[in-house]
Amino acid sequence: MAHEHKLEIFRGLWKFKSNTQKIWGVLAFLTFVTAVEVILGIYKPEMFMGKVLGMKALNWIFIILTIVKAYYITWDFMHMRDEVKALRRMVIWTGVFLICYLVFILLQEGGYIEGVYSNGFVKKDF
Amino acid sequence: MNTTVATTGTEGKTWGGGNDPLKASYGKMMMWFFIVSDALTFSAFLAAYGFSRFKFIDSWPIADEVFTHVPFFHGNYPMIYVAFMTFILIMSSVTMVLAVDAGHHLNKKKVTWYMFLTVIGGIIFVGSQAWEWNTFIKGEYGAVQTNGGNILQFGEYKTVEGEQKFERVAIADFAKVAHSERTQHESKSGLWFVSEGTLPEYSIDEVYKGLVANENILIRNQIINEHGHKTILSREESLKQLKSDGKAVVHGANLKVNEYGSPLFADFFFFITGFHGFHVLSGVVLNVIVFFNVIIGTYERRKSYEMVEKVGLYWHFVDLVWVFVFTFFYLV
């Protein structure tokens, strides 16, 4: 069983002396990201309310921060960083590809049905 | 004559056999593959939630108006409690990964201690989840469902620190209770083979009379306006809409009705957080089993704490899913 861990995050910007220290470092980072999300969620600053690519900028920020958190949970807590390339790609690429496909198809369809409801003489308000 | 090919010409290559190209044990690899399939299940649920939300994009409930409670405190604290739950789960992920780390050093005492903390974290999370469900099911202000299945909520303008603010009013606070002949049918007092569900606390008529009597109460419907708030009707519109469209008083949420808006919101909330809560519960059970195995020294004798690592992978995955549920149910 291999015990070597890669002891740096942010592409080497933050280096740690031991695996235990790295875990606490990642916890600090994840807590910080969650705190930012909650503060943005409570105050909803007006500057992020504009639409970017059909969705509020704030929502894009939330989704990106979530993916950042998911990355550090998988890479450092689940030790994906220390696995060989083949295993990493097998797991990540399969998941990412299928999830993107599924999300695209369902959201596209949901948007279409919304269009039918609002433009297609369907009475909802009664 | 030997028909089996004994040599393939790939000996010594990565996939030539006799070595382990993925550098992971069978159990660990299978746990990863299970996690991939489970991730697809969860993303299918979340994508289905997105589908329904896009379908009703202009009338979906606003999460910070739904989840505003904190146990033992009164008042309006959107998101605080879920943020706390998220932190608890991340924290128990940390103790888990510390247990795995201690396992690599064959430090039985530390593994025991960290596994114990992980189990405690899991139990706190499941308990909070149960509390959250309970609050959601009980509801707060109550609302009226229309014939078309829309929700009408009540409130009034109040001046708070020089600012006009729309504050919700509970139906129980203004409805005029009138004597009614209608009582709940029980099988012992009539047709024994007929039954009915609990009657709403107030009839539409009682709510209407209460609305007429309280001149400052207005109705808020589900439609989200350009500022991202729900539309508030004028006084005349409020009276007219309640009179013509009102069908039943709903209080709280279940799989059929939801006082906060679309019933689909409640359905997905129960289904997705329920499925996740079930995963946490199974994770706690697995952690408890591993915890006792650590105590009786099973892994000590094996000279390998890999089982802790495998259960750890599952536990982190549960945390990972929660990060996404948190975003899509409470933030976006």
Image (cartoon, coloured by chain):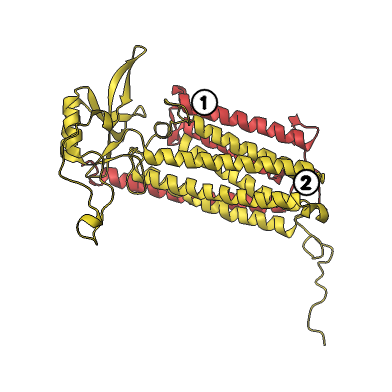
Chain colours: A red, B yellow
Task: Classify 10 Å Cα crowding around label 2: few (below 14), some (14-19), many (20 and above).
Answer: many
* Residue B124 placement: quadrant: top right
Q: Residue furthest top?
A: B162
Percent x, y of residue A112: 36, 47
Q: CA distance from mark 2 to mark 1?
A: 37 Å
Percent x, y of residue B170: 30, 30
Q: Is residue B185 above or below residue A48?
A: below
Q: Which residue is mark 1?
A: A39
Q: Which mark is residue B8?
A: none
Q: Which mark is residue B103?
A: 2
Chain letter behind tag 2? B
Residue A104 visible? The answer is no
The mark closer to the camera, 2 or 1, is 2
Marks 2,1: beta carbons within 8 A: no
Q: Residue furthest front?
A: B188
Q: Amino acid at mark 2?
A: Gly
Q: Is residue A40 above or below residue A78?
A: above
Percent x, y of residue B222: 30, 36
Please name the residue shown 32% across and 45% down the image.
Answer: B257
Please name the residue shown 71% across and 45% down the image.
Answer: A79
Of residues A20 and A26, the one drawn nearer to the viewer in this rendering: A20
Task: Classify 10 Å Cα crowding around label 1: few (below 14), some (14-19), many (20 and above).
Answer: few
Are discs 2 and 1 both within one chain? Answer: no
Quadrant including the N terminus of chain B? bottom right
Percent x, y of residue B175: 22, 31
Which structural element holds mark 2? helix
